[in-house]
Each structure stands twice: as structure tokens, then as C-alpha cells.
Amino acid sequence: MKTLTVFCGSSKGNNSLYIKEAEKLGEAAAKNNVEIIYGGSSSGLMGAVADGAIGQGGKVTGIIPEELKPKEIAHQHVTNLITVNSMHERKALMYEKGEAFVAMPGGIGTLEEIMEVLTWGAIGHHHKRCALLNVCNYYAPLHALLEHMVTEGFLSQSIKDKIIIEDNTKKLLKRLDM
């Protein structure tokens, strides 16, 4: 794998472990010569992932809509900062450039991004690996919902089983073949 798209919050969240794990993910990617593709912010978990990779000499591509540059504070030290016109363009480039996808804790934007790539995978639009880094059990409610969808007949077990869910960064990256 050469590139990993990471979806995560532009906020820090309420638990310092979120930032630490984001940094670890960026560092591990850099050590494995995997470029991080992400939303381009210098703040929150986004900034921590980028800083972790940059600190290890890794490559990082940030993709940010022009309108969000001031709000999300565009990262000025990434290898490549791509400014786009819309969120649709941002997501399309993030999806195109990533060979696999990981969602860390984040808000509704993060949830929307990972659910879209999961949906695309389910309908055969791509065959890339999709994962949730379940820091501090953040994604436990989503995991329960996915199980409920299977139980209720709205999601096949085989599609659900393709979603990698790990609490530990090292284990997650191993499952992504990094």
C-alpha cells in the first residue's frame, strides 16, 4: 500500500487519547512509507495525523475546500496541499487517491465520509479496505448498529465482515497490510 486516506475530526475531542492515537497512526504510516491523504486541516485529529507523519519524514497530502481554509486552518507543512472548490471535490479526490480508508473519531462529516466508502464498497464501486480505528470504544455504537442491520436483514453478514474494526493502531495497520 502506498496511500492511506484518513477520515477524522478537525476537533480534538474530549479525550487526549484521540490525539495520541491520531499521531501514532501518522507516525506508523510514515515509517511504512505510506502517504497520508486527509482533509488538510492543521487542527484536531486531522492535524495530529498529519503532524505524526511529518514528524517521521512521511508524505502527507491535504485536500481542503477553499471555504474551509480559515475555519479548519489549512496545514502549511504538508507535502502537498490541494485546494478544491467543494466538499464533493474534496471527497472525490480523497477516495481516488486512497488505496484504503480509515475512520478515526470525528463528527458527522467523518461518519458521512466513511459510510459513503463503505456503501461504494458494498455495491462493488471499489474493492479497497475500509476500517474504523475504535479509539476508546468510540465506534462501539456504530458497530452495534451494523450488527443490528445484519440481524434485521438490511445488511449482509459478508459485507459487514469486510469492515475492519480495531481498537489498536498496530493491529489495524497489520490488517490493512501495512
Image: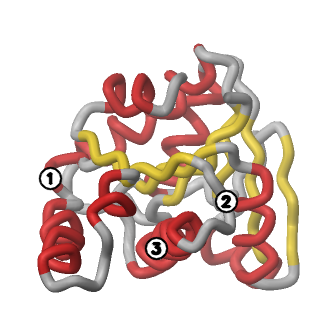
In percent of width and height, residue 153 lies at 22, 83
Q: Nearer the viewer, mark 1 or mark 3?
A: 3
Of callouts 1 and 3, the N-terminal one: 3
Q: Amino acid at mark 1?
A: Asn
| Nearest the eye: 77 or 80 | 80
| Nearest the eye: 2 or 124 | 124
The residue at 73%/39% (across/down) is 60
Circle 1/circle 2 CB separation < 8 Å: no
In percent of width and height, residue 142 lies at 22, 70
Q: Amino acid at mark 3?
A: Met
| Relative to 138, 125 lies left or right | right
Residue occupied by mark 2: 126
Q: Nearer the viewer, mark 2 or mark 3?
A: 2
| Nearest the eye: 174 or 109 | 174
Residue occupied by mark 1: 137
Please tell me whether residue 90 is drawn above or below residue 55 in the rendered image. Answer: below
| Nearest the eye: 11 or 161 | 161
Circle 2/circle 3 CB separation < 8 Å: no
Q: Of the numbered discs in the image, which one, if any, rests on residue 115?
A: 3
| Relative to 84, 141 lies left or right | left
Q: Amino acid at mark 2?
A: His
